[in-house]
């Protein structure tokens, strides 16, 4: 059973870059799509972007200019970077394994607060 | 961008009742790429249905999905206490989007 675990700073200052890592255990990250999703407190889900381990990426058009996803296959990790953050980026961030059957496996999520 | 509109926003029902949740898309969605998720407080979403009508492994058969084109539904045939949660639809084509969610409350 694939398990995902997000990690990273819980507090980021406005205008700085948010950096998160998703560690995958119980399976290889190769040959799968991986997505990041976020959820502000009390609100709905927002898809951030999708990454395939060959390097193909697809980002939410509203976030595309600020988002970068990458993979470290040696560590079985996927990373997310979001630049120029504001308070509106405060949310729980999830990583998930993506594919023809939707978002099959999810991490537990990590709360990121943007505040000075 | 495909906008998904879920209705109703909130539903108050009793255990044992049957319910249907709606998800309407602003343009046609391939049925191969429509999913439903359940989310309970403090937890990550859980995949229930993919490809519009296929149940994910381990999902009870009281959950069923149907629909095509722009109109999709999630039916729960007989509500159990653990089914009271928020439900989201998602189209997971080339640029995925989520509906705003339907909250299912205990009456």
Image (cartoon, rainbow, N blue to C red):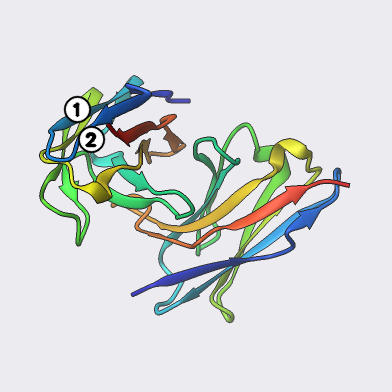
Task: Report the disc number at residue B68.
Answer: 1
As drawn, B94 above or below B25: below
* Count of numbered badges drawn on the protein: 2
Quadrant of the snapshot with the N terminus of chain A: bottom left
Q: What secondary structure is marked by label 2?
A: helix
Q: Would residue A7 be visible to someone looking at this image? A: yes
- Residue nearest the observer in this picture, A37 or A56: A37
The picture quadrant where one finds residue A14 is top right
Residue found farthest to the top: B26
Q: CA distance from mark 1 to mark 2?
A: 6 Å
**Residue furthest to the front:** B107
Residue A76, how many percent across, how many down? Answer: 53, 76
Chain on which label 1 sits: B
Residue on which disc 2 sits: B31
| Residue in view at x 57 percent, y 38 percent | A60
Give the camera-side residue of B98 and A40.
A40
Q: Is residue B21 above or below residue B90?
A: above
For label 1, count other residues whose C-alpha is less than 10 Å away and answer few (under 14), some (14-19) or many (20+): some
Q: Indicate whether A13 appears above or below B12.
A: below
Query: Percent from the top left, x then y, of residue B66?
Result: 15, 33
x then y, percent, for residue A41 = 59, 41
**Is residue A82 something one can see in this rendering?**
no
Q: Position of residue A28 (x, y in %)?
A: 43, 76
> CB under 8 Å between callouts 1 and 2?
yes
Q: Nearer the viewer, residue B87 or A105?
A: B87
Q: Is residue B41 left or right of residue B21?
A: right
Q: Which residue is painted at 86% across and 43% down in the image?
A: A15
Mark 1 or mark 2, which has the lower sequence index?
2
Task: Using the rendered image, report if marks 1 and 2 lie on a common chain.
Answer: yes
User: Which residue occupies 50% across, 64% down?
Assistant: A53
């Amino acid at each position: 059973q694939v398990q995902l675990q997000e990690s990273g700073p819980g507090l980021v200052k406005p205008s700085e870059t948010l950096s998160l890592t998703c560690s995958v255990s119980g399976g290889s990250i190769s040959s799968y799509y991986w997505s990041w999703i976020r959820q502000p407190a009390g609100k709905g889900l927002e898809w951030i972007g999708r990454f395939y381990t060959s390097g193909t990426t697809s980002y939410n058009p509203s976030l595309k200019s600020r988002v970068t996803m990458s993979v470290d296959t040696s560590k079985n990790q996927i990373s997310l970077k979001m630049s120029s953050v504001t308070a509106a980026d405060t949310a729980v961030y999830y990583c998930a394994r993506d594919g023809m059957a939707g978002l099959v496996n999810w991490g537990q999520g990590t709360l990121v607060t943007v505040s000075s | 961008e495909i906008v998904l509109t879920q209705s109703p926003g909130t539903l108050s029902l009793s255990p044992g009742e049957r319910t249907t949740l709606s998800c309407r898309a602003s343009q046609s969605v391939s049925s191969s790429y429509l999913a439903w998720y359940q989310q309970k407080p403090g937890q990550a979403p859980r995949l229930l249905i993919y490809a519009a009508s296929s149940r994910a492994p381990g999902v009870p058969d009281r959950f069923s999905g149907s629909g095509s084109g722009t109109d999709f539904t999630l039916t729960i045939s007989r509500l159990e206490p653990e089914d009271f949660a928020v439900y989201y639809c998602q189209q997971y084509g080339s640029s995925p989007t989520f509906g705003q969610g339907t909250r299912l409350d205990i009456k």
